[in-house]
Image: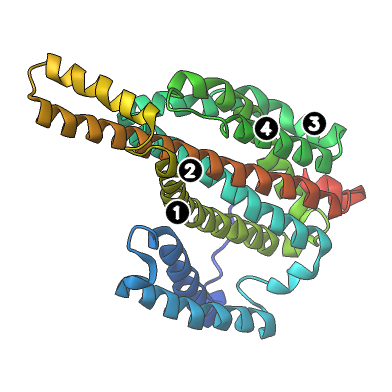
Amino acid sequence: MFAAIFYAIDKKPMKLDEFRRGDWWGILCMAIGLGSLIAMLEEGQRKDWFGSPFIVNCAILAAIFVPLFIVIELVREKPFVNLRLLGSRNLGFTSVVAFGLGLALYGTVFLIPLYLGTVQGYSPLQIGQVLIWVGLPQFLIFPFLPWLMKAVDQRLLVCGGCLIFAVSCFMNTVMSADTAGDQFMLANIVRAFGQPFTIVPVTGLAVATLAAKDAASGSAIFNIFRNIGGSFGIALLSTLVTRREQFHDLRIGETVTAYSPATQARIATVQQSFVSKGSDPVTALKQAYSVIKSIVRRDAFVMAFNDAFLVIAIGLLVAAAAIWFCKKPVGEAGARAH
């Protein structure tokens, strides 16, 4: 990265006097407000949300400093991040898309390891070997993106990428307890072919209709929405998996009862298996109940993950529709975006 900077960026004299005109209050409020908001979203589920003093403090800081940051940036003549640019049609709608893409990109990278570790008992190395199929195929696509962005409507590229990404998530909505790394491979490869078309072209659309002097602020706004979408997505999906696991566990428990003939037969079979291994009948019965309970909980978890992938897929469909509210880049604006 340093080599690329020294090679590609022209050397210019320092302008230390710019420090005096810096938007320091805006920077401070942004750092505290957005930092607290992201910490609250990412740590909320793990720390039992507002039952934790840490989460309460983060929520208070975010509630104070995020509005202050917005007000400062809207009224200051030279803001650190020019939020007034959200009035631009392309930047406004691509920011919505960026929020959805952040939820999807961060959400899938969060869900897959969590599923493989929780349900299948995979090690970090095994999880990495599954996730590598999300990354490797993208190397084949990225070299062609600049040409495609010039030859094809960028809105079509983003829409197509979102739809392909959504299909990969729909493929993960029918998982069973037998779904493991091998079964993820096809969905991960499909996901890898969709993601590049959602990352680069949408960034070009975000700044395509902005003046050159506003491109940096536009890019910053776009990335803020994507990062907040990612944090919000992780918080939403983490909570969703927990709540839906409890829901499915309850619903399965309504049918898997001691009065069900099928359950009684299954318990008897498992009990006999433990007896044949040397356990006494009473201990074997307790072990059989424990096995049934773990199977019910495992299946409830799998159903909860199916629900989470469905939420991501729906979010991507919304993003695919929202991108068509953007204007097609033309003339100098389109060239600058590329």
Instruction: Please tell me whether mark 3 or mark 2 is closer to you in this view.
Output: 2
Instruction: Please tell me whether mark 2 or mark 4 is closer to you in this view.
Output: 2
Q: Residue at x 35, y 25 (%)?
A: 126
State the mark number for residue 167.
4
Above-or-below relation of 59 to 122: below
CA–CA distance in space, label 4 to label 3? 22 Å
Q: Which residue is mark 1?
A: 243
Secondary structure beneath dot 4 equals helix
Going from N to C along the chain, the mark reached first, 2 or 1, is 1
Q: Which residue is mark 2?
A: 304
Indicate the amino acid at tag 1. Arg
Q: Residue at x 20, y 17 (%)?
A: 273
Label 1 close to label 4 by CB (< 8 Å) = no
Q: Position of residue 207 (x, y in %)?
A: 76, 55
Secondary structure beneath dot 2 equals helix
CA–CA distance in space, label 2 to label 4? 18 Å
Indicate the amino acid at tag 4. Val
CA–CA distance in space, label 3 to label 1? 42 Å
Going from N to C along the chain, the mark reached first, 1 or 4, is 4
Q: Is residue 207 left or right of residue 228?
A: right
Whether residue 92 appears in this view of the structure is: yes
Going from N to C along the chain, the mark reached first, 4 or 3, is 3
